[in-house]
Amino acid sequence: MEIVHSVCALDCPDCCSMLVQVENGRATRLRGDPDHPVTRGFLCGKVAQYLEREYSPDRLLYPQKRVGAKGEGRFTRISWDEALATIATQLTNVSRQYGPEAILPYSYGGTLGMLNGAGMDRRFFHRLGASRLDRTICATAGAAGLTAANGLRYATEPEQFRQSKLIIAWSANIHGANVHLWPFIVEARRNGAKLVVIDPIRTRTAALADRHFAINPGSDLALALGLMHVIIGEKLYDADYVDRYTNGFDALHKRVASYPPERVAALTGIAAPDIVQLAREYATTHPAAIRVNYGVQRSEQGGAATRAIAALPALVGSWREPGGGLQLSTSQAFQFNRAGLEMPELQNRSALGREARIVNMSLLGKALTEMADPPVKAMVVYNSNPAAVAPDQNVVLRGLRREDLFTVVLEQLQTDTADYADILLPATTFLEHTDIYFAYGHYYMPLARPVVAPPGEARSNVDTFRALAIRMGFDDACFRDTEDDMIRTLLSSGHPFLDGITLDRLEREHFVRLNVAPEGEPFLPFAQGGFGTPSGKCEFGAETLEYTPPVESRFGDAALRGKYPLELISSKHDDSMNSTFGNRAGVDEETSVLHLHPADAGPREIRTGDRVRVFNDRGSLLLKAQVNGVVQPGVARAPSTRWLKRASDGRNANALTSDRLTDMGGGPTFYSCLVQVERCGD
Ligand SMILES: Nc1nc2c(c(=O)[nH]1)N[C@H]1C(S)=C(S)[C@@H](COP(=O)(O)OP(=O)(O)OC[C@H]3O[C@@H](n4cnc5c(=O)[nH]c(N)nc54)[C@H](O)[C@@H]3O)O[C@H]1N2
Ligand SMILES: Nc1nc2c(c(=O)[nH]1)N[C@H]1C(S)=C(S)[C@@H](COP(=O)(O)OP(=O)(O)OC[C@H]3O[C@@H](n4cnc5c(=O)[nH]c(N)nc54)[C@H](O)[C@@H]3O)O[C@H]1N2
Ligand code: SF4
Ligand SMILES: [Mo]
């Protein structure tokens, strides 16, 4: 028996380091690395059971080609040689006939590994001249809002939350989606800190908080402006910090004048005295930290809302203090040499000979059904399950069904998307390949080596794209790079945060704190300004901060609201990871529930346990009702992305979501979604 280090590759801010017990080549137990300052010896419930997935009889073991209809899921085994030859021939034909931009890569968060997530794949598609994918499906609206304010997307370290005296979890279901922050909050509360949650849903985190404000969906910009109204009006801001390190205070002052607590109360559903009290507490409690997560930016004004929330710590000067500031994402501190890894210059050597067009992944339905010049004729999907996760699902599925679309899917399990593949390739898990990771919830960079051998003929994404490049005759030296070559390239950025971090050191230490601050000292990114904006200051940007309710919301389009009066939020499921684990029966049962308030259920004669149909112009979905206090009147909650094939109607919440984009960053508006609900006959 031996204990081997590894890293959880799932798309989670915690990026846990783990210890794997291996017996006779088989992993028999996973646990969190007790030496990792954020993992602290435990894994979340879903990954504690990851070995069930690793050794699932449903793992894909061999390359296969489709023999049934698209979506039916019938395949037959072929050799790697046949698979690669077919793909190479098809991609070459598409490229010759329509130009290489008719080929679309589609990938997202299956792994946060740099090599398997954005390595050999990027080189391959650049060399091909394929369309470039704008990876907007999760975080780009928030990233754009944060960048507009701060220039750099740096954040308060999770370890500092233990020093906070007031923690605001703003659209952050910490207990469900970011559980390794929780022990630091528990410690802070033991020392007298208060936890306030701003979330339309009574999540597990909200239920455990000191105060929960059930905000109207998509009204966060109004709330942030209302808080600033009070903070500025009562002169509770840090005038010195504002003066030295921010830009645009006077315009902000004018802007917030039209957001008095009474108006903001009407817009947000939070009582005016509560808004005043929260503003006073936030400005006068030291240190106070905001954990804002991505829920807030999945609505129509998500970018501006994030920008306004990001302005709060600058206004009250809380960036000065350990345990102050704000955390959205730490990922930008992983200042890798990404260009060296991805090699966009290969596009010049492609059949296209120039930079390829950009396709927004959140508009996949349109890309597959409407795009021209050239149309998408081939798609290669890896690290993603678009049939389940992309908005406006019925259009996406119509696109995936196209007989003239050649689809390749690299997968571990036979997902809904895999069912539409022409060629289906077996992929390794993080326990089976080498990778180096970035985190978006802390500053430790980990390396993981394979812990067990791949089952059957499964290959890593790196190996598959390398083999494809060679099969297509690409003789560029970069396609012969080993994993270690690519890691060395990544680490060669010369950025001071990566000083002294080498492959050898990662090999020895397994994870290394970025050089964001001297050892043992907290990282205070903006204590003395140092913002990444052109001015070097936090840019309040008041001109961008005018609140208008989302079209799909209670104060939005009146006609739409007349037909579809409920605001549907399809947020994360606590015990799953997007659609990963959607194969598990337990997940399946828990994710088939629609939460409704009694005030909405009553008139519809809906009781807990009833089968209900949720619908709008885009589609419909069958779920089981839960009538309770999890949501407010006018709001409904359906879990996000279950596997379609495990539902009787073959759909999930994305049958209802729209492909309307956010105000900034081209992100999806999953949480601005109006629906109607009715009881179904039994
Ligand atoms: N268990 C689990 N963990 C996960 C994931 C998972 O699927 N399951 N997914 C991972 C991924 S990909 C990501 S991006 C992160 C996301 O982590 P989070 O951003 O924390 O997750 P979400 O559930 O999208 O949104 C957080 C909360 O925002 C609330 N919310 C929705 N609309 C609004 C609004 O208009 N205003 C406010 N204030 N709140 C709103 C939701 O009710 C939800 O409770 O989590 C990661 N971790
Ligand atoms: N309605 C609604 N829709 C949503 C969301 C929501 O909250 N509500 N959340 C959105 C968000 S935040 C996100 S990030 C997206 C997530 O969307 P995706 O990134 O597509 O996430 P998953 O559904 O987890 O699918 C990842 C797939 O990658 C596979 N995979 C894992 N590792 C590897 C690997 O090494 N190689 C290969 N080839 N495959 C691998 C897994 O088996 C899994 O099927 O969904 C979005 N969609
Ligand atoms: S999903 Fe997140 S919390 Fe769970 S083990 Fe992976 S990194 Fe840790
Ligand atoms: Mo995400």
Image (cartoon, helix red, strand yellow):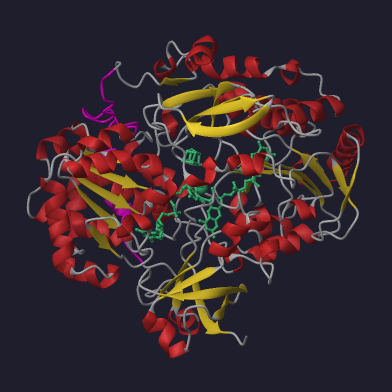
* Residue extent of the magenta highlight: 520-548
Residue under the image location 35 percent in, 40 percent down: 181
The residue nearer to you, when weighing 11 against 548, is: 11
Q: Which is the main secondary structure of the residues drawn in magenta?
A: loop
Q: Is residue 497 above or below residue 567?
A: above
Q: Position of residue 57 (x, y in %)?
A: 74, 45
**Left or right: where does residue 200 sit relative to residue 16?**
left
The residue nearer to you, when weighing 253 against 459, is: 459
Let me know if residue 246 appears in the view.
Answer: yes
Quadrant of the image occupied by residue 464: top right
Q: Position of residue 454 (x, y in %)?
A: 73, 30
Residue under the image location 41 percent in, 26 percent down: 36
Let me know if residue 658 appears in the view.
Answer: no
**Left or right: where does residue 196 sit relative to residue 178?**
left
The residue nearer to you, when weighing 121 against 95, is: 121
Q: Position of residue 92 (x, y in %)?
A: 87, 37
Q: Is residue 33 above or below residue 478?
A: below
Residue under the image location 62 percent in, 54 percent down: 582
Residue under the image location 86 percent in, 25 percent down: 473
Q: Is residue 278 above or below residue 268?
A: above
Q: Position of residue 22 (x, y in %)?
A: 62, 26
Quadrant of the image occupied by residue 244: top left
- Is residue 352 within the magenta segment? no
**Left or right: where does residue 613 sit relative to residue 301?**
right
- Is residue 525 within the magenta segment? yes
Q: Is residue 603 above or below residue 389?
A: below
Which part of the image, by quadrant, shows the C terminus? bottom right
